[in-house]
Image (cartoon, rainbow, N blue to C red):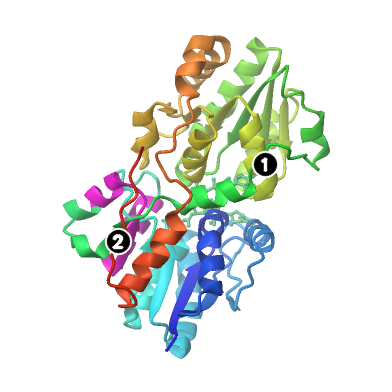
Amino acid sequence: MQKKIMAVFGTRPEAIKMAPLLKELRKNDNYKLIITVTAQHREMLDQVMELFQLEADYDLDIMQERQTLSGLSARIIKKLDGIIAVEKPDLLLVHGDTSSTFIGALTAFYNQIEIAHVEAGLRTHDKYSPFPEEMNRQLTGVLADLNFAPTKKAKENLTLENTSENKIFVTGNTVIDALLSVVASDYKFENKLLQSIDFKNKKVILLTAHRRENLGEPMENIFKAVTRLTAELTNLEVVFPVHLNPVIRELSQKMLADNDQIHLIEPLDYLPFANLMAGVDLVLTDSGGIQEEAPSLGKPVLVLRDTTERPEAVEAGTVIKVGTEADKIYQQAFKLLTDKNEYSKYAAAVNPYGDGKAVQRIIEAIDFYFGLTKKRPEDFKIR
Ligand code: UD1
Ligand code: UDP
């Protein structure tokens, strides 16, 4: 008898990181996969679904402009409950730390459905940073029956919280599986602006910023730092694919639009975005996923946050947690862009988050969980 697995997710990064797993589950005769998207994101989610040729069986279509956390959570739980009650899956699969993740897990729990959590165990232990993601991930962890921890460190975090060892599998992060499937050395950009950038002779920074705790003054500081960098370094170009959040769009327009070294562009589809990351000199970001991807492309990253739940790349020496003070961001970026020795220290390609086989390990772990195999998958180990 096929086991029924329902995946629930709603944002761009969840879709990117779930896609390689869902594609394999769809092909697997042991499982019947049902995809439910909350559509907490709309356009940013849809382009990933299209790229990976995934179709949703249910689409809750809950996104609203300037949505509040309570509002979006309420809309998800109301719509998801009926679907879970009718479908009664054997396992509900969620990913990471978004509101779709936590509310998906909570709704499964109310229906007494077992829960598997992909990318489990990352922690800052700071309730408000990242906000609300740290608590979304912790609360999902409490509810989960199966935890797919990307690294040994993430497993340790879970065991410290008394999660039973046999519920935890160290799998690597599926983001590396996704990344390896889209980056190509001969990739050509369709975007005219990207085509016009002289990646060989210019210094290029890729900037992304979207975290709720950075809205307001921290984001103004980030924009000030980048503006100062362009004033000091005339051969610098900054590419900023601006998140669709209207608060970010307004501020970036106000502070950066007049600067012809700074290119504000629409969010890029994952395929050009990943290939852009592979072509730039330096990444400035408050994103979670980009902190995992850029190191495996050998790109130094300045993390525009005071905390990170991803310490592995900081330890490996490719990510620097720089915070959100304008001066610090400026100093650190300037040093990396102008000092070759300093740059090469941070540009070593290391892969603390995965080897491209996370999906395989997760499926083996699900097989093991359902008793389809007696063999526990081997843990992913950082080389
Ligand atoms: C959400 C997640 C965050 C994740 C991020 C990835 C939560 C609480 N936050 O934050 O963990 O890192 O996604 O990007 O779950 N919008 C659109 N179209 C889109 C997407 C967003 O217009 O396709 C606009 C809407 O006005 C929306 C706003 O962006 O109200 C914010 O979206 P929301 O999902 O609430 O927050 P994110 O910052 O994207
Ligand atoms: N990304 C993308 N287009 C963009 C910006 C980011 O495809 O214009 C991808 C990026 O490669 C990564 C993911 O989106 O896989 C990260 O999403 P985001 O930064 O929004 O969320 P987080 O990882 O912080 O949850």
The label number, if any, that marks residue 141 in the structure image? 2
Q: Quadrant of residue 264?
A: top right
Q: Give the vertical position of 328 relative to 104 (above or below).
A: above
Residue type highlighted by circle 2? Gly
| Residue bearing the label numbered 1 | 184
Instruction: State the residue at coordinates (51%, 74%).
Output: 28
x and y percent of residue 212 in the render? 48, 46
For residue 238, what is the image quadrant?
Answer: top right
| Most foreground residue, 36 or 317 | 317
**Residue sitting at 73 percent across and 16 percent down?**
201
Q: Are marks 1 and 2 in contact (CB under 8 Å)?
A: no
Rendering coords of residue 299 (x, y %): 54, 29
Q: At x 34% / y 66%, what residue is drawn?
A: 365
Location of the C terminus (image quadrant)? top left
- Report whether residue 222 is seen: yes
The Cα–Cα distance between marks 1 and 2, rounded to whole angstroms, is 35 Å
Q: Main secondary structure of the magenta part?
A: helix
Secondary structure beneath label 1: loop
x and y percentages locating residue 341 in the rendered image: 49, 10
Q: Amino acid at mark 1?
A: Ala
Report whether 82 appears left or right of 306: right
- Write the start and end of the magenta stretch as one range: 132-157
Can residue 327 be seen here? no
